[in-house]
Image (cartoon, rainbow, N blue to C red):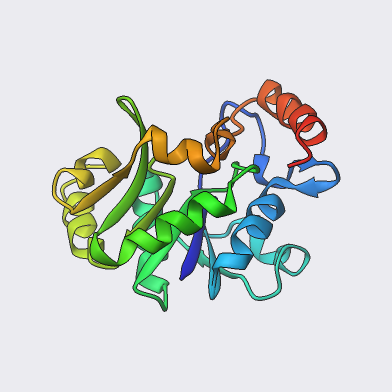
Amino acid sequence: MTSIILAGGRSLRFGWSKALETIDGKSLIKWVVDRLTPLSREIIIVTPQGDCFASLIANIHLSSKIIADIYPGKGPLGGIYSGLAKSSCSHAIIVGCDMPFLNVALLNYMTQISPVVDVVVPRIGEWVEPLCAVYSKNCLALIRSLLEHNELRISKLFTVAKVRYIEENEINRFDPEHLSFFNINTKADLAKARILAVQKEV
């Protein structure tokens, strides 16, 4: 299994590159890498061209690969395509760089289901989390077609791919507080994450 971390956002709501902000002395992206390492043959970090991560990777994870977006400016869907295209495995866990509390057991459960579908993605009611999901390389042609038509909604992929939704009752078996989906977009989110890291000892 490959794990792909999308670090291509401009952090506009945050004000600066949030991936290198720290919780309990560890950068956000390092939190994510540490959660993914037990499940991964390789870890790929997708960034915009010329991003600063290339010079910092030795401090994050020595075996991680940093790649540039193949379709720059195409948002998370472009990042998913770029990571899958460079993956050496048929399936990949794909997450955002700002999700420090990913639940390893939940992700492992999702990987066990992934061989028979194109996408495994959590769903709570009508809400879906496409950046804590498992994608197959079978999605590459579908995503490329969407990108070439400037259709950037990940939800559109789910209408043409074979998708297995992980429903709330399944999620609750592993992550009843749904902390896997806690992502950091603002300084207030970062402050809350620092408190959670202490309170939950996650």
Foreground residue, 150 or 170?
170
Q: Residue at x 45, y 55 (%)?
A: 109
Q: Is residue 135 visible?
A: yes
Residue 30, compared with residue 85, is above or below; it is above
Q: Quadrant of the C terminus?
A: top right
Q: Specify the quadrant of the image occupied by residue 21.
A: top right
Q: Residue at x 71, y 55 (%)?
A: 30
Q: Residue furthest bottom?
A: 88
Would you say 60 lies left or right of 179 here? right
* Residue 69 percent location from the top left of the image: 43, 59
Q: Is residue 136 visible?
A: no
Would you say 125 lies left or right of 38 here? left
Would you say 183 lies left or right of 149 here? right
Q: Residue at x 37, y 67 (%)?
A: 91
Q: Residue furthest top?
A: 188
Residue 85, compared with residue 131, is above or below; it is below
* Residue 74 percent location from the top left of the image: 35, 47
Q: Residue at x 66, y 39 (%)?
A: 18
Foreground residue, 124 or 70?
124
Foreground residue, 46 or 27?
27
Q: Specify the quadrant of the image occupied by residue 116.
A: bottom left
* Residue 187 percent location from the top left of the image: 70, 25
* Residue 164 percent location from the top left of the image: 26, 49
Q: Specify the quadrant of the image occupied by residue 184.
A: top right
